Image (cartoon, helix red, strand yellow):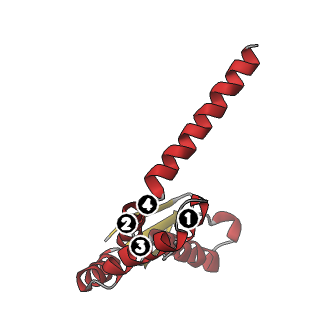
Amino acid sequence: MKFLILSLFFLSSCAQMQKQWHDSTCNIDAAYSKGVQDAQNSKSHDNSEFARCGEGVNIGSLQKSYSEGFSSIAKNPMHILKKTLDRADAYYECTYNIFNESFSTSGSSESEAKYKAVQKCKRSKHSFHCSNINIDCRKI
């Protein structure tokens, strides 16, 4: 009996969560807002999420609304300038210290700078001694 009650509880919870997602996602305003948000966060244009909205919803109009929101930001000159400046600001310097020797490199991202430091170490030391573990990085 407890199993049946728990099963019904979880099924109703899942159905309720699905309805809540549908109500908050499958409308024109939410689609437009999602497009704006994705463009502001430099995500790629992807309106495929609305295909899950199902019957009773005009998926084409949701996808169009998403695209309009995305384009409103992506084509905005201030957004393009901000993206360019953000990339220019993000520069990292990483140093790998091993056996009293330092290998310093820099890159436009922390992962790029770390990769370069490990590669620089491997050119001088056995690869066994070179890893991402002992690398100190800072944003410059």
Q: Do the residues bearing badges 3 and 1 touch, measured as CB atoms within 8 Å?
A: no
Disc 2 crowd, CA 10 A, few/some/many (<14, 14-19, 20+): some
- Measure the C-alpha gap from mark 3 to mark 4: 9 Å
Q: Residue at x 75, y 19 (%)?
A: 3
Q: Earlier in the sequence, mark 4 or mark 2?
A: 4
**Residue 65 shows which numbered tag?**
3
Comparing labels 3 and 1, the label whose residue is closer to the camera = 3
Q: Residue furthest front?
A: 56
Q: Secondary structure at mark 4?
A: loop
Report the amino acid beneath label 4: Asn
Residue named by callout 2: 37
**From the viewer's perspective, is residue 107 above or below residue 1?**
below
Q: Position of residue 105 (x, y in %)?
A: 45, 77
Tell me, yes or no, if residue 66 can be seen here: yes
At 41% from the left edge and 70% from the top edge, which residue is drawn? 35
Q: Quadrant of the C terminus?
A: bottom left
**Which callout, 1 or 2, points at the residue further toward the start of the chain?**
2
Q: Secondary structure at mark 2?
A: helix
Residue 95 location, quadrant: bottom left
The secondary structure type at the circle numbered 1 is helix
Quarter where residue 16 is shown = top right
Which is nearer the eye, 123 or 66?
Answer: 66
Q: Which residue is mark 4?
A: 27
Q: Nearer the viewer, mark 1 or mark 2?
A: 1
Coordinates of residue 107 in the picture (x, y in percent): 43, 78
The residue indicated by pointer 1 is: 49
Q: CA distance from mark 3 to mark 1?
A: 13 Å
